[in-house]
């Protein structure tokens, strides 16, 4: 059998251990200390925020040493059901081992092998969203064996955390408990889509969710010292939106591509923050569903030029925020709907998040954002706040999962389930595969 080398998470200099245990209060104190000395990062980060490597401090008699996984051996091939693959081990005290019960399928799960991107090593284990039971944890962990948890694996380079296997590792700041009112299959449908929606609104647009019990991502991200952030998301985290440009209650947000799960969460989270959403999509297929979730207006996408006219009319030509989940063409249409010129005259910018792709042409007065998803798994305070909020929203019935289509075929049925997605059979729903 071809072995799969374990991938260790990247580190960031002297801050590698700091990030693993910082609380929001710690981050704010660190930021205040930094400001007090003229902005230079000081040895405050060398305090006792150090994670010791932890390897098997608890007995694991009931956990097999090998498992069955799905391996991708080459791009443009199908996943191979592979038995007797090593069960992943824990590397840090803030990790848990989860017995996977249900896996939520994402478009990336079939697009990556078909088009050959997002595959850091071969053979590769894929899968981003799963629900399962904790079977191994450090004694000090907030999660213990028998806890049913929802895990979000955005750290695709570490295959220990991938979903297409019987046992997977997760950081405690990237999981939450599944409330009793949420079925495991519904929990497996949330993950990456919720995180992308939360960071799009909270980081890229500066939405403050704290009035509704959520994070203020704008303040949280700026509390993290620059040296403790991955370089490729530093600008987005610290300067993506200016304080005067932040989206506030009553502002309009245009959302193009209403059938995606991410759109569903953008809509619900925007509503919680007091924003008004004009959604563009197939009204006949998805209109009723998104109106129920809080869209102020649904515009049919079959005539894109007319849709732009309607958006501009409804928003009085003052639209400053837009999210696209469909592709580069519809993202370009949203640029037409945004008040880019008005923002520029005021010394500000309009803001566009292209979750599928941003337009190639840049314009003065327009900020085009890439969601800094790394913040979720690289900065524990961001992950922890996000998952604690998600658990509260679910438990209080403030967030509604999408309609779920369940396949009870185990890992052996994942390829057939992904074929359904390739053929476009799943629209406005999430496909979940149950392993047990």
Image (cartoon, rainbow, N blue to C red):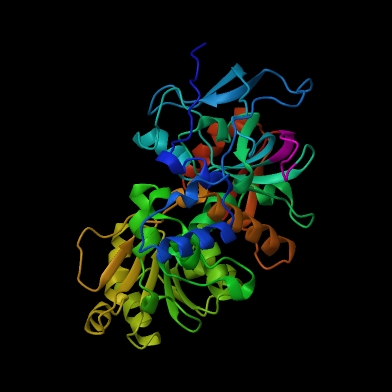
Q: Is 316 drawn above or below residue 9 in the view shown?
A: below
Q: Residue at the location (38% across, 73% down)?
A: 321
Find the magenta span and give its range. Answer: 132-143
Q: Is residue 79 above or below residue 188?
A: above
Horizontal relation, residue 49 to residue 144: left or right: left
The quarter of the picture where the C terminus appears is top right
Report the residue that reaches farthest toward the top.
Answer: 1
Please tell me which residue lies in front, 36 or 274. 36
Please indicate, yes or no, whether residue 284 appears anywhere in the rendered image. Answer: yes
- Of the pair 65 and 130, the residue shown nearer to us: 65
Task: Tell me if residue 395 comes above or below residue 9 in the rendering.
Answer: below
Between residue 200 and residue 385, name the one nearer to us: 385
- Locate residue 86 relative to residue 278 in the image: left or right: right
Would residue 398 be counted in the magenta stretch? no
Up the image or down, 348 lies above or below 34; here it is below
Q: Is residue 139 magenta?
A: yes
At which x and y percent is residue 278?
A: 45, 76
Left or right of 83 in this view: 27: left
Indicate the quadrant where residue 200 lies.
Answer: bottom left
- 158 or 325, nearer to the observer: 158
């Amino acid at each position: 059998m071809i072995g799969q080398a374990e991938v260790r998470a990247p580190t960031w200099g002297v801050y590698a251990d700091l990030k693993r245990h910082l609380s929001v209060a710690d981050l704010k104190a660190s930021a205040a200390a930094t400001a007090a000395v003229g902005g230079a990062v000081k040895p405050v980060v060398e305090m006792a925020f150090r994670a010791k490597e932890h390897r098997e401090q608890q007995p694991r008699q009931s956990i097999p040493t090998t498992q069955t996984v799905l391996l991708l051996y080459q791009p443009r091939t199908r996943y191979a059901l592979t038995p007797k693959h090593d069960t992943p081990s824990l590397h840090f005290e803030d990790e848990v081992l989860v017995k996977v019960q249900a896996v939520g399928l994402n478009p990336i799960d079939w697009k990556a092998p078909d088009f050959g991107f997002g595959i850091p090593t071969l053979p590769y284990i894929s899968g981003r969203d799963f629900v399962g039971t904790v079977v191994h944890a450090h004694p000090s962990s907030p999660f213990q064996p028998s806890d049913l948890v929802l895990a979000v694996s955005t750290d695709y380079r570490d295959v220990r955390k991938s979903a297409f296997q019987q046992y997977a590792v997760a950081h405690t700041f990237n999981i939450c408990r599944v409330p009793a009112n949420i079925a495991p299959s519904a929990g497996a449908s949330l993950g990456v889509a919720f995180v992308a929606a939360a960071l799009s609104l909270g980081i890229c647009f500066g939405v403050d969710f704290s009035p509704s019990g959520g994070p203020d991502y704008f303040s949280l991200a700026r509390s993290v010292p620059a040296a403790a952030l991955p370089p490729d998301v530093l600008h987005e985290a610290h300067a993506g939106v200016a304080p005067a440009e932040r989206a506030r209650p009553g502002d309009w947000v245009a959302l193009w591509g209403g059938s995606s799960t991410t759109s569903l969460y953008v809509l619900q989270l925007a509503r919680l923050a007091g924003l008004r959403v004009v959604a563009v999509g197939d009204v006949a297929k998805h209109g009723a569903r998104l109106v129920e979730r809080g869209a102020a207006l649904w515009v049919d996408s079959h005539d894109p030029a007319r849709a732009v006219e309607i958006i501009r009319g409804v928003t009085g030509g003052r639209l400053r925020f837009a999210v696209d989940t469909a592709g580069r063409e519809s993202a370009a249409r949203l640029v037409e709907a945004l008040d880019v010129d008005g923002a520029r005259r005021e010394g500000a910018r309009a803001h566009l998040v292209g979750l599928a792709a941003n337009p190639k042409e840049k314009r003065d007065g327009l900020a085009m954002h890439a969601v800094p998803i790394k913040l979720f798994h690289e900065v524990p305070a961001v992950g922890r706040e996000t998952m604690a909020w998600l658990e509260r929203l679910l438990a209080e019935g403030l967030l509604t999962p999408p309609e779920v289509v369940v396949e009870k075929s185990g890992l052996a049925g994942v390829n057939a389930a992904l074929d359904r997605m390739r053929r476009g059979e799943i629209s406005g729903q999430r496909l979940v595969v149950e392993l047990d």
